[in-house]
Image (cartoon, rainbow, N blue to C red):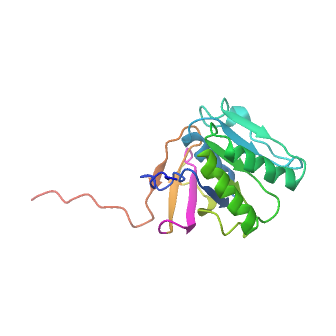
Amino acid sequence: MRFDPAPADPLTLLRQRVHEAEGRGRRAFALFQAARHPGPLVWIIPSHAPELPMLRGLPQGVGERLHILRPVGETDLLWCVEEALRAAPVGLVIAEPSSPMSLTVGRRFQLAAEAGRTTGLMLIRQDAGSNATETRWLCEPRPATAADSTLHHWSLTKNKKGTINDWIVDWNGATAAVHMVSQARQRLEPAAAPR
């Protein structure tokens, strides 16, 4: 089976693979990915979870493509994830498992993503991921330096096909556009004017 090459944009998830995001900003990262993936979106949230995505507050074009599933137990949630990953027209499957995923579950998800040519993103609790996952991201909000800025610190802490890295991004949550923010004191100085 042929896999897509690594995306040119380091923040775009590799297709036909399952990825994980942890940290307080994991849902913002999921919405960012939803805005960038074409096709139907499936978000699987346990029925006991008190928070749901607010459809009118989602990035442009996401609400119309989003299907929310609310399985009752963890077994049903895992079944829903596997079936959604196998569904060929689905562009992105986001899930919020309540308990740590085993290597077996992670491997089943990878095989399902390959079969359906779908991307999966598991929003996990700290240290609750599977060794089978392609990448793992640590996502934390950052204090903004301007009133209209929303900064995020997204760290790629595990990557099976490349290096790990981290980025400070300015993403307003409305579109798929993102601005990379330089670290303090790493900005290029303008060239000096000739004398």
Q: Residue at x 72, y 44 (%)?
A: 84
**Residue 92 percent location from the top left of the image:** 63, 44
Q: Residue at x 29, y 61 (%)?
A: 189
What range is drawn magenta here? Answer: 147-163
Q: Is residue 137 magenta?
A: no
Q: Quadrant of residue 135?
A: bottom right
Q: Nearer the viewer, residue 17 or 52?
A: 17
The quarter in which the C terminus is drawn is: bottom left
Tell me if residue 125 can be seen.
no
Residue that extends furthest to the front in the rendered view of this protein: 1
| Above-or-below relation of 125 to 71 | below
Q: Nearer the viewer, residue 117 or 43?
A: 117
Q: Is residue 160 left or right of residue 58?
A: left
Q: Residue at x 69, y 56 (%)?
A: 109
**Residue 20 percent location from the top left of the image:** 65, 59
Q: Is residue 161 magenta?
A: yes
Q: Is residue 185 left or right of residue 94?
A: left
Tell me if residue 73 can be seen.
yes
| Above-or-below relation of 105 to 73 | below
Image label count: 0
| Above-or-below relation of 70 to 17 | above
Q: Is residue 90 left or right of residue 195?
A: right
**Residue 45 percent location from the top left of the image:** 80, 47
Residue that extends furthest to the top in the rendered view of this protein: 64
**Residue 43 percent location from the top left of the image:** 73, 43
Q: Residue at x 76, y 53 (%)?
A: 96
